[in-house]
Each structure stands twice: as C-alpha cells, then as structure tokens.
Image: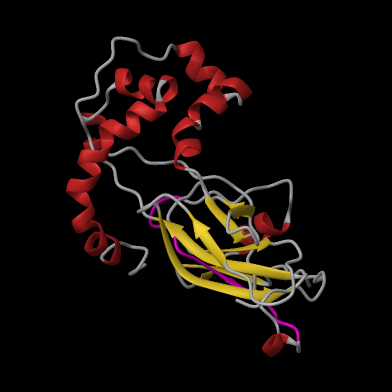
Amino acid sequence: MSSGSDALIRLISHHEKCSSSTSIQSRKVPSASQLSRLERGDARLKRRAMGVADRLGGIEVQVRTRSGRWSTVGGTRETGPIATDTRVVPIPALPPGAATIRLRMTRGLWRIDQVSLVRLLGQAEPIRLDPVAVRRTGIADTVALHALLDSSRVLTTLPGDDYTLEYRLPESFPNDELFLESRGYYLEWMRDSWLAEDDQGKAMIVFRNPARVLRDLAPAYKRAEASMEATFWSSRYAHP
C-alpha cells in the first residue's frame, strides 16, 4: 500500500457470533441489586460486563516500522448486532515510499468484506432530510409521520409491523451518498430455547472471569464453527 498523510483505512465488517452451552458451573449468582445497578448504567459493573468483549478486542490497524516491528496506529470495534458497518480509521503520516499495513483481530470474530486505503478530502456537511410520507402496510399513516417529525415523540413498532418512509431527494442526489440516521431502542423478545438454558451461575462467571468463559466456550464454538457459514447465509441478514 502506498502511504499518505491523510490516508485512511475503510473497514466494512460485521460480527459472526455463536451461542452455545457448556459445562461452566458456579454457585454464585448475580443479585437483584447488581442487575438493577447494571440497568441504571453503573460504570463499574458495566466495565465488568464488557470483560468478554474486552478480551476479544476489536480490529487493530498496525504499520510496520523501519525496524521491522509492528506499531498499532488505530483501530475500531463494534458491539453488534450482526449488520454491515463501514468504519473509517485515520492513520498518521507515514514515511515516503511503500508502507506495510495489516489488520490484527481475533480469529473468527469478524467478517471483512472490504479494506480500502483512501484519502480524506475534508469534512462533509450533510443535507438533512425529513420523511415526507409514511405508509403502514401500503396505507398512508399520518400519525406515524407526525411521530417521526416530532422529537418529543416516538414511533413504537411491534413484530410484524411494516412501515415505508418516503423522502424527497435533492437534485444533487446522483452524486451523493445516503445515510439513514435514527435513534431508539428495541426490546429483545425472549425465546423458549433461551429460557431452557437459563443459568445465573454461568452468567456470573461472565462478570467475574471472562478469560475462563472464553476458554470453556472454545470447544463448543469449534463444534459449531463448521456450520456457521451456512447458518449465516440462510439467516434473515442475507434474506431479509
């Protein structure tokens, strides 16, 4: 890769995750107060809850120095869920001539679709567009439209709801990129198969000893790894 003072690495990636059960055992369970503190955003518990993610790490961008050593100059990480994501990682000015750049990450955690070396041309000023119409299952829904246009309100959707948002694009659209900005949250609907595997003792080990959790889950992950590719491409991500 050739170097440049404003060079960037563009990452398009998403996580591949596997959920499996193992024989992790513990007598300690998280108390109601601990779970309540976690929901309220307790900083200390939040750091402990992120222990597994911290162990797995993100994607490090490294450059080989003149001495032959690898130096980390940037990186990116993503919590999830499975989704295509584009990240731009600025890298510092490199010496003239060819430079060797590599990405360092946990094997099997990421799927990289594209890596590009690009130049930063300057700060882009977006043109913000509000929806001009909303249809619910093909029928105009002015209530939903007003909820989306009013920052003090929210649009609540449930499984099976189908909304189509219409925007009026500017004349410069053929030369523009589109980015959908939204705010909100979603509730994860519990599944019977999840409840059958409920084990608060195992959950507590995630907080207390993330390194052990990863070691104990590794055999189950390897057993499922061979079928993960087919499972992924048959999922709703590939066929929404």
Residue lying furthest front in this view? 67
Q: How many marks?
A: 0
Does residue 225 appear anywhere in the picture?
Answer: yes
Residue 188 vs 166, above or below: the answer is above
Q: Residue at x 70, y 62 (%)?
A: 90
Based on the picture, tell me whether residue 61 belongs to the magenta stretch.
no
Q: Which residue is rendered at x = 47% and y = 38% of the image?
A: 53
Q: Quadrant of residue 32?
A: top left
- As drawn, is 207 to the left or to the right of 224? right
User: Does the stretch in magenta take in 165?
Assistant: yes
- Left/right placement of residue 63 relative to residue 211 reads right
Quadrant including the C terminus: bottom left
Q: Is residue 83 visible?
A: no
Residue in the foreground of this view, choosing between 232 and 116: 116
Q: For the point 50% across and 45% down, which residue is it? A: 186
Q: Main secondary structure of the magenta part?
A: loop
- Along the line of sight, which residue is nearer the eye, 51 or 194? 51
* Visual colour scheme: secondary structure
- Dividing the picture into quarters, in which one does residue 161 lie? bottom left
Q: Quadrant location of the N terminus?
A: bottom right
**Residue 219 image offset from top left, x and y in percent:** 21, 39
Residue drawn 71% across the image and 71% down it: 7
Q: Is residue 225 above or below residue 211?
A: below
Establish if 216 lies above or below 12: above
Asked if residue 62 is positioned above or below residue 224 in the image, the reply reads below
Q: Nearer the viewer, residue 130 or 224?
A: 224
Q: Locate residue 119, reporting x and y percent.
A: 72, 76
Residue 200 on image: x %, y %: 32, 19
Residue 88, horizontal then vertical, whole percent: 64, 64
Quarter location, residue 82: bottom left
Tell me where the magenta segment starts and ends, as one range: 158-170
